Amino acid sequence: MARYITQRLIYMVITMFLIATLTFFLMKFLPGTPLSAADKLSDEQQAVVLEKYGLNDPVPVQYFNYMVNLAQGDLGISFQFDNREVTNIIMERIGPSMQLGFQAMVIGTIIGMLLGLVSAIYHNGIMDYTSTFLAVLGQSVPSFVFAGVLQFYIGVKFGWLPVALWEGWEYTILPTVSLAIFPIAIAARFMRTEMLEVMGSDYIVTARAKGVNKVGVVFKHGLRNALIPLITVLGPLAIGLMTGTLVIENIFAVPGIGEQFVKAINMNDYPIIMGTTLLIAFLFIFIILVIDLLYGVIDPRIRLAEGE
């Protein structure tokens, strides 16, 4: 296990280096200039600003300097927020995004798994059709539509919860529910499909023949084996939710990282673009490692490395 994890950590470092390099050079192809109101600045003023951020240097020199600073944990200074470190800006923004994403994933996974189980247990029954309809609805209708409906009825018409802003836990409920719809649909669909396949397996038939009751067959033998494909799908989805969803954050005025990321792209704020991209890439790679480790925990037949 230790050898496997060490290898994966080395691959993570190599992957992060490649992502940083590719993102840096792709960023240079973005149209426009990082100077705000460049048309109002004289050539001398523009030269002073570009010199301040090292943008007058040749691109290879900029790349070398950035990678050296990155190796020391320095993500640079934002162009958009003068003299503010990118690390501090990201740390301020990542909290609300991760809270919403985490809450949405927990709620979405639990409800989705229950719907999928009900569908599989009562296959071709009214509960199966209802659960399948809800799953299709959750995947087909964009989350911002649910967000608008919730804001109007729950926030405006009934006044039960705040419509928007970020001033307490109650302000997280509506955006969390809006975000959870899609994970519910994904979890329900995968759980139903995998459970139907697992419940038709030979070892399930054997368990039934040995007198194992229905609850034992479903939760002890079926659910465990049906979880692996679900975890594979939900892992990257969780990172996508926890690193910010632009539309939902804008609708509910959440000061998250997704909103900041788009603003940075529009303003060519290279350090924030790089910092956010590297953060998301790291989380994706890390969660894939965690998923691989979970495979062995859920199903002991899966071995992570030869000889283990």
Image (cartoon, rainbow, N blue to C red):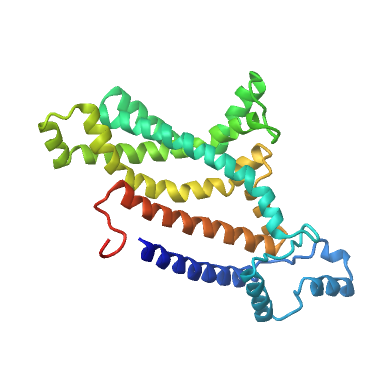
Q: Is residue 287 visible?
A: yes
In depth, the one of 218 and 151 nearer the eye is: 218
The residue depicted at 74 percent of the width and 67 percent of the height is 33
Query: Which corner quadrant of the image does residue 217 belong to?
Result: top left
Name above or below for residue 22 compared with residue 129: below
Query: Which corner quadrant of the image does residue 2 belong to?
Result: bottom left
The residue depicted at 51 percent of the width and 50 percent of the height is 239
- x then y, percent, for residue 76: 71, 65
- x then y, percent, for residue 82: 81, 60
The residue depicted at 37 percent of the width and 55 percent of the height is 292
Residue 308 located left or right of residue 170: left
- x then y, percent, for residue 12: 47, 65
In depth, the one of 223 and 41 nearer the eye is: 223
- x then y, percent, for residue 232: 38, 50
Q: Quadrant of the C terminus?
A: bottom left
Residue 252 located left or right of residue 226: right
Name above or below for residue 203 compared with residue 3: above
Q: Is residue 259 visible?
A: no
